[in-house]
Image (cartoon, rainbow, N blue to C red):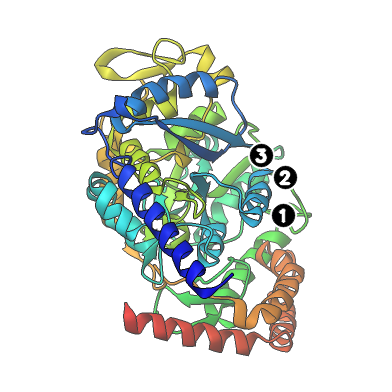
């Protein structure tokens, strides 16, 4: 092809692109547009959860509404819990075109860093203004990676609060004062009472003890920033004094029979509905004890271990991201804007169709109908803004006010908004993870003597390259802190 012909072809291509852009200039307008003049765009939305029979039926109602509001229809595709992450990785690797996908935690970070999700900073300002004004700023800031937001977090409890959860039947039976429990050590007399008097109960449902750290990756890996003292210096948690003290107490509990003998290897999930435990550790949200009691079939009581803290994994625990392959990201953002600000749409997607899946009772509250349980039982946490959901009949009137107070009380963790790039030390992290897999479960469950096993673990961590990883984390953190 000669040079002149090539130039002509380039000009023609530019002209056709310009004309196409002009002809589609109104395609991303929302409710103010003349929706009937153009074909609705179909939004493909992948979500997590056991596929429900009535998804298509509900999406028909959703699409009637979104067609009117933003001239778009919605196709929801659910992928089961155990398959979701793997299938999403295959889709992303293949470059499959879709619009929105649920993501969370490390997967959100990794996929955003490799370009699978669209940067939403500008779209949020042009097509998500109402959403931006609605969602707790801690979510939008905390979910940013290098200053860019790649997904819309579910607006719910912004902080994490570890709590001890007690079987209230036993608490009441022995007149126990759980309000005085402020540490692991404080549990000792209560556990002894249960061990001596309740042979059918295991005093501790296996849990990893709470430790005051902001973990850089997983909570069994050794690198973290302290929540107390020097919050700006990454440390090896297994060399800390608090770790040794905590593990000594756990080992004492293990030797006393308060922890199951096979705790280090057990896969027992300790379901709430099986009343064979006295105390367990859970993550709290306002009025969680009511949910847990309902699920258990008997009453539980809670005692906080610390004030709520906003960590990276609490703001990235449930996110809707727009795919980099979306053919119309403006429509996808307009839909997310509507989903998070429009009570009718949010409740329709979460609760189903009124009169089919739920019905209203007194004071605008609702109760589920059999069809909701059998055919449209959706994972509410993953679907968007909680503060515009209808309350169930047994929900407290001030539930959402309590959530707001909880969020206002949450303090920021040292690394909120910092996401470590593991690429420079990927080999070392893999080796360290192997050491952690060997030592962390027996140590954290109290199954072994920490005075003997902690030095062994720390020696192996160092041999695996721990110092190099700590130095790289500190370097990246200091650079991030300079710019934030």
Circle 2 — which element?
Answer: loop
**Relative horizontal placement of residue 483, taking residue 455 as reference (left or right):** left
Tell me where residue 444 appears, x and y as whole percent. Answer: 65, 65
Q: Which mark is residue 257?
A: 1
The residue nearer to you, when weighing 67 against 129, is 67
Q: Nearer the viewer, residue 370 or 196?
A: 370
Label 1 packing within 10 angstroms: few (<14), some (14-19), many (20+): some
Q: Nearer the viewer, mark 1 or mark 2?
A: 2
Q: CA distance from mark 2 to mark 3?
A: 20 Å
Instruction: Point out which mark residue 25 bears.
Output: none
Residue 232 visible within the image:
no
Label pair 3/1, CB-CB below 8 angstroms: no
Nearest to the observer: residue 254 or residue 322: 322
Helix, strand or loop at disc 3? loop
Q: Residues within 10 Å of mark 2 (few under 14, many from 20)?
A: few
| Residue shown at 48% from the left, 59% from the top | 313
Q: Earlier in the sequence, mark 1 or mark 2?
A: 1
Q: Which mark is residue 198?
A: 3
**Residue 166 appears at what percent x and percent y?**
52, 43
Which of these two is toward me, 79 or 37? 37
Q: Quadrant of the N terminus?
A: bottom right
Q: Is residue 245 left or right of residue 125?
A: right
Q: How many marks?
A: 3
Spatial separation of the CA atoms under disc 1 and disc 2: 17 Å
**409 vs 474: above or below:** above
What residue do we see at 55% from left, 66% from top?
114
The quarter in which the C terminus is drawn is bottom left
Residue designated by label 2: 268
In the displayed structure, 126 sits above or below 47; it is below
Residue 89, percent across and down? 65, 54
Q: Secondary structure at mark 1?
A: loop
């Amino acid at each position: 092809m000669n040079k002149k012909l090539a130039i002509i072809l380039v000009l023609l291509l530019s002209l056709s692109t310009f004309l196409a852009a002009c002809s589609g200039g109104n395609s991303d307008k929302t409710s103010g547009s003349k929706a009937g003049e153009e074909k609705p765009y179909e939004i493909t939305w992948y979500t997590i959860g056991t596929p429900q029979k009535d998804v298509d039926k509900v999406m028909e109602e959703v699409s009637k509404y979104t067609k009117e509001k933003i001239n778009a229809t919605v196709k929801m595709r659910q992928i089961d819990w155990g398959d979701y992450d793997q299938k999403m990785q295959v889709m992303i690797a293949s470059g499959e075109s879709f619009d929105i996908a649920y993501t969370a935690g490390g997967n959100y970070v990794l996929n955003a860093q490799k370009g699978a999700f669209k940067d939403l900073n500008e779209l949020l300002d042009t097509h998500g203004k109402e959403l931006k004004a609605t969602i707790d700023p801690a979510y939008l800031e905390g979910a940013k990676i290098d200053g860019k937001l790649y997904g819309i977090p579910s607006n719910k409890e912004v902080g994490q609060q570890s709590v001890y959860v007690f079987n209230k039947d036993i608490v009441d039976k022995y007149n126990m004062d759980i309000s005085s429990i402020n540490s692991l050590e404080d549990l000792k007399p209560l556990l002894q009472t249960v061990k001596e008097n309740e042979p059918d109960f295991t005093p501790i449902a296996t849990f990893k003890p709470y430790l005051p750290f902001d973990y850089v990756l997983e909570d069994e890996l050794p690198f973290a920033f302290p929540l107390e003292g020097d919050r700006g210096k990454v440390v090896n948690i297994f060399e800390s004094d608090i770790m040794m003290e905590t593990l000594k107490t756990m080992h004492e509990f293990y030797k006393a029979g308060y922890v199951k003998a096979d705790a280090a290897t057990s896969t027992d999930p300790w379901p709430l509905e099986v009343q064979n435990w006295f105390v367990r550790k859970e993550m709290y949200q306002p009025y969680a004890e009511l949910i847990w009691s309902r699920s258990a079939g008997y009453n539980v009581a809670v005692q906080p271990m610390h004030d709520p803290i906003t960590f990276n994994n609490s703001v990235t625990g449930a996110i809707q991201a727009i795919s980099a392959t979306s053919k119309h990201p403006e429509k996808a953002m307009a839909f997310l804007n509507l989903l998070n600000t429009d009570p009718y749409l949010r409740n329709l997607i979460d609760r189903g169709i009124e009169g089919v899946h739920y019905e209203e009772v007194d004071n605008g509250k609702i109760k589920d109908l059999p069809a909701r349980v059998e055919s449209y039982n959706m994972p509410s946490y993953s679907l968007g803004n909680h503060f515009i959901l209808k309350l169930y009949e047994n929900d407290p009137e001030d539930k959402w006010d309590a959530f707001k107070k909880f969020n206002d009380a949450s303090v920021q963790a040292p690394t909120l908004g910092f996401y470590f790039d593991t690429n420079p030390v990927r080999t070392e992290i893999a080796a360290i993870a192997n050491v952690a897999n060997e030592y962390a479960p027996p140590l954290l469950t109290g199954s072994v003597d920490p005075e003997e096993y902690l030095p062994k673990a720390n020696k192996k961590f160092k041999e695996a390259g721990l110092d190099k990883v700590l130095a790289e984390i500190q370097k990246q953190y200091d650079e991030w802190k300079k710019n934030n």
